[in-house]
Image: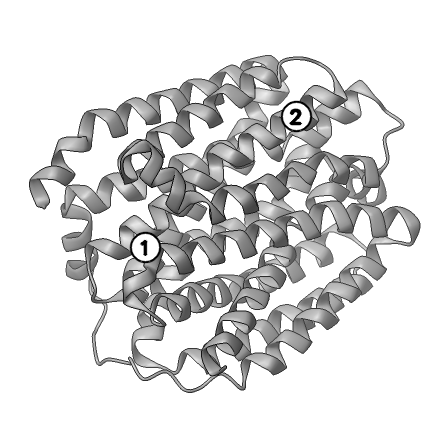
Amino acid sequence: MLKTYIVLVVLLSAMVTISSLYITQPMQPLFMEEFGISITQVTLFTSVVLLALAFAPIVYGYLLEKFDTRKVLFVSLGMIGVFQCLLCFAQDYRTFLALRLLEALAIPAALTATLTTLMRIDMQNIQKYVSLYVAATVFGGVLSRVAGGFITSISSWQFTFAALGITTLVVAILSFRIPQSSQMTNAKITPKIVLELLKDKRYAVLYAGAFLVLFCFQGALNFMPFEIKALNPDITPAQIGFLYLGYIIGIVAALLVGRIKRLLGGDLRAIIFGFVVFGIAPLIMLIKSFWWLFFAVFVICIGMFIVHSVLSAFVNSISSEKKGITNGLYLAFYYTGGTIGTTMPSYLYYHFGWEVLCLFLSGILFASALMFYKISPIFKEAK
């Protein structure tokens, strides 16, 4: 029962944390009008959090090797809940962005703590717990985008943020009942430890894959609300949120990834398959239609969450030591890709249009599949 409680609380923690990260996305056109800001400025509401996630997990990974994971999770969730509630009172762009920056300091701690806690539960079933973690984050993404857009349409964005903030505080209280971590070490994080991991070509390639997959994911989905708004100026936040319903298939993909790996013949083939499927999606998004975009999100999520689930487990299966630092590095590369994916494509979109952006992302994804195909021998040599 205790193990079940820990898993349940950790998964709830992942859900509300990811919801806090992406809650602003379906409301971006609304914030542009309310605060009188540009596309580049409104995307900062997401990218500042992703930027923190790009750097902070390495430090938090180190802290999780030395301090009680339960306390890190409790404090970080409490901070997220408080700042989420304070955002309701923001009256201008600068105040809102400043509060998002403060919230961004806590989100990496919560995500790193959730993943590390799951990895320490059962070393023999890494893929199972990684799949549950990814499924929980997918559900959080659906909840924030679809439910967030819907609630905002029938009430206000302030009510949506307050509801999420209070829910997060409740989960924080639940997390304090998790038993104290028994796997703390006296390990010191040094540049040498990080370089040793990156010198291992297997880690380097897997981290590169994590960077590229979220770069393309954010590049596609972060600018989709603006494209659909251009197609239909009268579209509501609820309708924009509805586009993200395809996230649900990501839950299925994450939970079935073990079977997918067996069917395709291993981790690398599953990663290559995921990148290829993902690469097809931006080509579908070239069709200027609400329903084709809706369908494309399903394809994106199938490919994306197969890749993410397999990569997360693969990284953890290489070594049984320093889980906090290993996961911290994985999340750092993953969210660095996401940070750049929310900002750099805005220049392509603004100067060259939606079509060029879609072709660019598709090219990167197919090239990533080719990269994993070419480097597969290094994993066989290491066995």
Q: Is residue 125 left or right of residue 51?
A: left
Q: Which amino acid type is marked by label 2?
A: Phe
Residue at 70% from the left image edge and 65% from the top image edge: 84
Observer-nearest residue: 168 or 284?
284
175 over 207 or under it: above or below:
below
Q: Is residue 116 visible?
A: yes
Q: Which residue is mark 2?
A: 295
Give the quarter of the image for residue 65. Answer: bottom left
Q: Is residue 340 visible?
A: no
Residue 297 percent location from the top left of the image? 62, 31
SS of the residue at dot 2? helix
Q: CA distance from mark 2 to mark 1?
A: 33 Å
The amino acid at mark 1 is: Leu
Q: Nearer the viewer, residue 124 or 343?
A: 124
Residue 20: give x, y in percent of width and height: 64, 58
The colouring scheme, among rainbow, by chain, secondary structure or one colour, is one colour
Residue at 82% x, 35% y is 239
Given this view, does label 2 or label 1 mark the residue nearer the observer? 2
Residue assigned mark 1: 329
Residue pushed farthest left? 381
171 over 368 or under it: above or below:
below
Q: Residue at x 56, y 24 (%)?
A: 347
Up/down of 364 relative to 14, above or below: above
Q: Quadrant of residue 156?
A: bottom right
Between 89 and 175, the one nearer to me in the picture: 175
* Front residue of this view, candidates 24 and 307: 307
Q: Quadrant of residue 175?
A: bottom right
Q: Which mark is residue 33?
A: none
Residue sitting at 59 percent across and 39 percent down? 249
